[in-house]
Amino acid sequence: MSDPMMPLPAIEAEPTSVPPAVLLANHLKALKLPTFVREYEKVAFEAAQDRADYPRYLLRLCELERIDRERRMVERRIRMARFPHTKSFDTFDFAAQPSLNKALVLELARGEWIERRRNVIALGPSGTGKTHTALALG
């Protein structure tokens, strides 16, 4: 039985001809961290300029990865919904449709009706923004 206080022998690393940057990129791809692969050098340079410590460097990379994953998730869900167009309320002209209750539409955009498992029905004549509003809510 070995002594628990005795240090483990050092394991000699075999010299490799593969540059560390290539190995790092390979590992990050295997771990499915594409934003890390794309951004780690740039963020490292910025962290060095700001004299940021390693945890702040890793935190920034993790933040970028998470933001990118959320963006891709939204894009994937929109594709899966098979919307004919992508619309948002940023491009909707509420002034052109004064009969449309802007406050109500923006309240619906908060999404509480989804959490409460409620339906939304858009009724009105042609050209009043029903499709644009429905796609933006989607």
Image: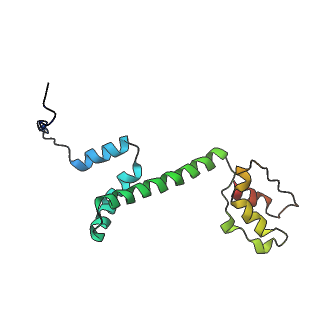
Q: What is the x, y in percent for residue 2?
A: 13, 28
Q: Image quadrant of residue 6?
A: top left
Q: Residue 70's x, y, as percent?
A: 52, 53
82, 9: nearer the viewer: 9
Quadrant, the N terminus = top left
**Is residue 9 found left or right of 82 in the rendered image?**
left
Q: Quadrant of residue 108?
A: bottom right
Q: Going by the image, does 25 lie left or right of 91? A: left
| Closest to the observer, 127 or 39 | 39
Query: What is the x, y in percent for residue 30?
Result: 36, 40
Above or below 7: residue 84: below
Query: Which residue sits at x=31%, y=47%?
Result: 25
- Image position of 60 with respect to 8: above or below: below
- Percent x, y of residue 7: 12, 38
Report how many numbered discs are placed on residues in the image.
Answer: 0
Residue drawn at x 68%, y 55% as measured from the top left: 85
Where 46 sits versus 33, above or below? below
Seen as rendered, the residue at the extreme right is 125
Q: Residue at x 38, y 42 (%)?
A: 31
For this orientation, the residue located farthest to the top is 1
Q: Residue at x 81, y 70 (%)?
A: 97
Residue 57 vs residue 137: left or right? left
Q: How is the image coloured?
A: rainbow
